[in-house]
Image: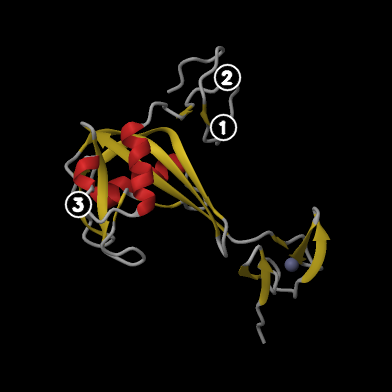
Amino acid sequence: MLTAIFIVERGIDYVAADYCLSCGHALETRSIGGGERRACPNCSYVFWGDYSIGVGALVVKEGKLLLVRRAQDPGKGNWTNPGGYIEQLEPIEETIVREVLEETGVTARAKGVVAMRDLPRSIHNLYVAFEMEYISGDPQPDGVEVDEAGFYSLEEMQSMHVAGFTRWLADIALNGNSAGLLVDAAPLVPLNGHGLFRIPTSTKKEVD
Ligand SMILES: [Zn+2]
């Protein structure tokens, strides 16, 4: 019989694995790296926790931010910026470009990271917000995930049902005075397969 292990920490309860995801053996609780972990006595598997990473796009055109209206729960009817969850092997720069194109038909390019949100809960979520350069396309909703799409000013957002977190991001996108962490496409040291985002330095002023 499968039995779930519930762990309560900081007032949040979450489910830990009971069987090894690698070999299927029953897990045991062991002290690893200063914490109690569920680990496999038969192989090297350790349950480190449940995590997810979201990416959000801040595409600005002529002082207006690209927003979509969610057609599905959670948040159905709310206006948000386009975004989604990262895939196992897809670089996040590609994920965010793909999500913008899929949800709105707009082609945009990732410039850099301008905001992050940390949400520790049963699935610990990290959200990375990208400033995107608009390239082409008129916003068209995909009709599945979103049923409206367009560019809106902060003033226009006043009378729209914009999600609270999206209002926080809209202020950064439209009033921000720093470019944040820029995409480093030509790092000082060759680092194949790394997605690199950084502040400029005196040794490397231009990053693009
Ligand atoms: Zn195992």
Front-most of 75 and 43? 75
Q: Give x and y (percent) for residue 174.
A: 31, 34
Disc 2, SS: loop
| Position of residue 145 measured from the top left corner of the image (x, y, whole percent) | 28, 60
Residue at image mark 1: 192
| Quadrant into which the C terminus falls | top left
Query: Mark 2, residues whose alpha carbon is within 10 Å: few (<14), some, or many (≥20)?
Result: few
What colour scheme does the image use? secondary structure
Point out the quarter of the image occupied by ligand 1. Answer: bottom right
Type of the residue with mark 2? Leu
Q: Tag on residue 159?
A: 3
- According to the image, label 2 marks what residue? 188
In space, the residues marked 1 and 3 are separated at their CA atoms by 46 Å
Q: Position of residue 53 (x, y in %)?
A: 50, 52
Q: Marks 1 and 2: which is nearer the front?
A: 2
Q: Is residue 150 left or right of residue 18?
A: left
Q: Quadrant of the N terminus?
A: bottom right
